[in-house]
Image (tube, grey):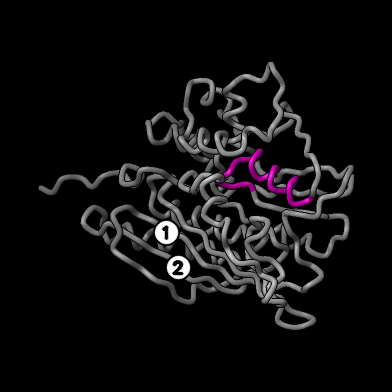
Amino acid sequence: MNAPLPRLTSLAHGGGCGCKLAPSVLQELLANQPAAAPFRQLLVGVETGDDAAVWQVDDNTCIVATTDFFMPVVDDPFDFGRIAATNALSDIYAMGARPIMALAILGMPLNKIAIEDVRKIIAGGTSVCAAAGIPVAGGHSIDAPEPIYGLAVIGLCRPGEVRRNAGARPGDALILTKAIGVGVYSAAIKKGELSGEGYAEMLASTTQLNRIGGELSGDDTVHAVTDVTGFGLLGHALEMARGSNLTVTLKAAEVPLFTQAARLAQDGHVTGASSRNWASYGEAIRLPDDLPDWQRNLLVDPQTSGGLLISCAA
């Protein structure tokens, strides 16, 4: 009799957007990258850490390109594929574009995972792309020591409708389209301590396409947009503030949370990425003296397939 195969999340040292390099490490890696100045058609590159690259083809069309992949944040292979694909598509929507096609990125430890489960991961991603109205037109796969899956996605938009993480204006209101808590929920999953209701809540959020970003592309009252992912709400808000040369003020008590997020955070369910996030940018954040550590941990909690942070006219 064959031994049961291990849980997906047990095959990886991290999961979801919590796998991202710490902001400080990424900044160091990109510090000496050449400026985009010689490429006049490159409207958005690496300068402000935006969600995707934008290349202007002509007066009416821009190509928007991104790639996003990570290790399992859940154990169900089909759900993992859905979450990863939704997360990758989010970058396109955040830029105000509409996706047109995707390429799959796959790395699997084939000696530790069943081929049928790999098929389910791919099927999950394909189902989300179908819901978004785009094909998975190809991809690339490797035999890897840990499971990874994601997409490279191409989108289109008009030059005047590109939405960036810079451009917020004084007096703008901030809107967050999804609740916070994916990181603490995923930490609880690894320990087998997330309830069925909690799992359903997380899955509903992480597989919800951020279509609203594309729908807002022509709205002149929307000044800046980014999706909240691995750097946490504070990290992505800080990127928006720096890119816009402004100070952003958030009211911690008004940040929407998953139903069980506060309790799980208070019980010590926290990802390593939360600590790395705070260590990377905490010196630029001013917190109330009475803010408890568990609440701070939620504000820097890495979000996998998180919502959009929208800066718009109040």
In magenta stretch: residue 3: no
Amino acid type at mark 1 = Tyr
- State the residue position of label 2: 104
Confirm or deny contact between disc 1 and disc 2 (CB under 8 A).
yes
Q: Find residue 163 and report its horizontal and vertical position in percent.
A: 75, 61
> Compared with residue 280, is residue 17 higher up or lower down, i.e. above or below?
below
Residue 314's mark? none
Q: Find residue 272 and report its horizontal and vertical position in percent.
A: 46, 35
Q: Nearer the viewer, residue 167 or 311?
A: 167
Secondary structure under tag 1 reads strand
Q: Nearer the viewer, residue 189 or 60?
A: 60
- State the residue position of label 1: 149
How many angstroms separate mark 1 from mark 2 (CA)? 7 Å
For the stretch drawn in magenta, the main secondary structure is helix
Q: Quadrant of residue 106?
A: bottom left
Q: Is residue 307 left or right of residue 196?
A: right
Q: Quadrant of the C terminus?
A: top right
